[in-house]
Image (cartoon, rainbow, N blue to C red):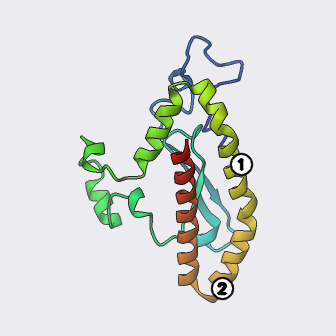
Amino acid sequence: MEVLSSHYYETPWKDEKVDIPHDTNGSICHSSTQHGSVFQLRGNMPVEIGAVAWIAPYHPCIHVFVPWYSGMNGAPEDHSRYDSYEKAISDHFTDTENFRTNFPDKAYWKYVDMAEEIKKDYPNNIQKIRPQKEQYQKEMMDQQTAFEAEMIRLYQKDKDQCRSALTDYTFRRLSAWHKLCEVN
């Protein structure tokens, strides 16, 4: 997660001539970065709980990585464009022009707007949000073991209820991050 958030800021490799680190050549978190993903794959758990995609939308240096469990029932409506996998595959490269106009209610724009606001004075603004980002990320990581132990117990009793609980957990985490984004 730290590597995907990097643009060499505060390292010997930072381009001192670039005020906006997202414009640093060769940086991982760059102006063209749409999201960061880290996959946690554990064979000692049911795949629904053990396979997790930690996703940070837009620029990972600004946004937290939220766990998306493979056992989830689906994505939040404001995070998805299609109702089915088949539709997503067939229409993936359509409607790409005027995307913001055609899909104004998507959560993606909250992430973009926050990042663009922060990038106006990145060195100062990132220092303002970094503590709450790090605290929220740490909270999710610290709670993961206990949450997943609870999910394994639920999975053994009722797989459908477990899937709903995994979905609800990710939705709540996304919603809480949205609220934090709106504050700033």
Q: How far apart are marks 2 and 1 (CA)?
A: 32 Å
Label 1 secondary element: helix
In the image, what residue occupies the spot 44% across and 39% down? 113
Asked if residue 158 can be seen in this view, the reply is yes
In the rendered image, residue 110, in percent from the top left (x then y), is placed at 44, 46
Residue lying furthest front in this view?
Answer: 183
Q: What quarter of the picture does the N terminus occupy?
A: top right
Q: Label 2 is placed on what type of residue? A: Gln
Residue of label 1: 135
Residue lying furthest top in this view?
Answer: 17
Asked if residue 96 can be seen in this view, the reply is no
In terms of depth relative to the viewer, which is nearer, 38 or 146?
A: 146
Residue of label 2: 156
In the image, what residue occupies the spot 64% across and 57% down? 40
Q: As drawn, is 85 to the left or to the right of 55? A: left
In the rendered image, residue 99, in percent from the top left (x then y), is placed at 28, 44
User: Is 178 drawn above or below residue 42 in the view shown?
Assistant: above
Q: As drawn, is 114 to the left or to the right of 176? A: left
User: Could you classify mark 1 by the number of other residues whose Cα lies within 10 Å: few (under 14), some (14-19), or many (20 or more)?
Assistant: few
Label 2 secondary element: helix
In the image, what residue occupies the spot 56% across and 17% down? 19
